[in-house]
Image (cartoon, grey):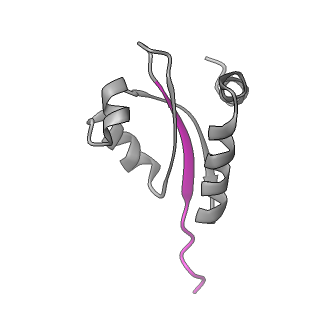
Amino acid sequence: IPPLQRSYWVYILANRKHGALYIGVTNSLERRIWQHKQKQTDSFTRRYGFDRLVYFEEFRDVNNAIDRETVIKGWLRKRKVALIKQDNPA
């Protein structure tokens, strides 16, 4: 039996009111988005009311996911928006 493959996700949330973006990493995208919507997360995401999942990528290795999160966080907003629009034009 092959070992269980875990998934790790880098995701971007948007906020309609402020136009802000939040980039995170998780091993359960569904659970994490639910936590954000229920405001069970840290004060930054709760304060700004991030409510829309606008982008995500899946990884099999947690280190690769963390590295990708770090890279995206270092980008200027224009490049982040271009990444989102590439897969999610609406």
Please tell me whether residue 38 belongs to the stretch shown in magenta: no
Which residue is painted at 55% across and 51% down in the image? 9
- Horizontal side of residue 1 vs 64, given as left or right: left
Which residue is painted at 40% across and 28% down in the image? 50
Magenta range is: 1-14
Among all residues in the image, which is located at the extreme top?
A: 17
Which residue is painted at 67% across and 39% down in the image? 74
Q: Is residue 66 above or below residue 90?
A: below
Dividing the picture into quadrants, the one containing residue 7 is bottom right
Dividing the picture into quadrants, the one containing residue 35 is top left
Q: Quadrant of the N terminus?
A: bottom right
Front residue of this view, candidates 68 and 3: 68
Q: Is residue 13 above or below residue 40?
A: above
Q: Position of residue 46 (x, y in %)?
A: 31, 32
Q: Is residue 40 above or below residue 13?
A: below
Q: Position of residue 30 (x, y in %)?
A: 41, 47
